[in-house]
Amino acid sequence: MSDGLPYFRYHPDPVATGSIRASADRCVCCDRSRGWIYTATFYTEHDIDGPFCPWCIADGSAAERFEGDFTDCFGLDGVSEDVVHEVTRRTPRLQQLAAAALVGPLRGRGGLGRRGRIRGAGEVPRGS
Ligand SMILES: [Zn+2]
């Protein structure tokens, strides 16, 4: 763990995963050099001329200012909007499977069992 970095509930050690690394670069959002920058993906239509610091991710200002997401919400259907918002806009990018796995326990009952409903029993498989 890295002292002083903001805490991301859904990405507890972004330094270990390489999403955030030590750097003296300036953050394009707050224009400060705070010792750490974000290195992974940010989905936006804006041209962004530099990295973000983790603080601007944590407080949502980077996502708000540049109108983008760090993680797309694939696999997060069924979770509350608050959680989706936090994962996509206030958390350094997660692998999607990791995001789903982390968020999964918060879904509560019935979240996973709903998919793959079996079609009518009399249906004849194609090609037979
Ligand atoms: Zn910043």
Image: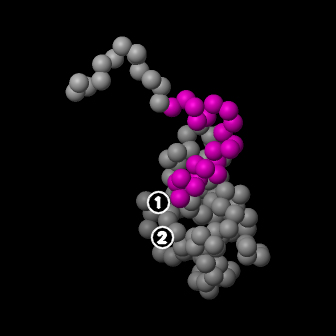
Q: Which mark is residue 18?
A: none
Q: Residue 73, position in %: x, y?
A: 53, 48
Other-residue count near label 2 (Cα within 10 Å), few / some / many at <14 / 14–19 / ≥20: few
Q: Against 72, is 12 above or below? A: below
Q: Quadrant of the N terminus?
A: bottom right
What kind of residue is marked 2? Ile
Q: Quadrant of the C terminus?
A: top left
* Tag 1 secondary structure: loop
Task: Assess whether residue 97 is covered by the magenta stretch.
Answer: yes
Which residue occupies the extreme right position in the image? 3
Q: In this rendered view, identify the residue nearer to me: 30 or 68.
A: 68
Q: Which residues are magenta?
A: 95-115
What residue is rendered at 55% in x and 29% in y? 114
Which residue occupies the extreme front position in the image? 128
* Tag 2 secondary structure: loop
Cβ of mark 2 under 8 A from ligand 1? no
Q: Against 121, is 12 above or below? A: below
Q: Residue 44, position in %: x, y?
A: 47, 59
Q: In this rendered view, identify the residue nearer to me: 42 or 65.
A: 42
Q: Which residue is mark 2?
A: 48
What residue is rendered at 77% in x and 75% in y? 4
Q: Are marks 1 and 2 in contact (CB under 8 Å)?
A: yes
Q: Which residue is mark 1?
A: 44
Which residue occupies the extreme left position in the image? 127
C-alpha separation, residue under disc 1 versus residue under disc 2: 9 Å
Q: In this rendered view, identify the residue nearer to me: 101 or 29.
A: 101
Task: Assess whether residue 13 is covered by the magenta stretch.
Answer: no
Inspect this view and state whether residue 110 appears: yes
Q: Quadrant of residue 65?
A: bottom right
Which residue occupies the extreme bottom position in the image? 24
What kind of residue is marked 1? Thr
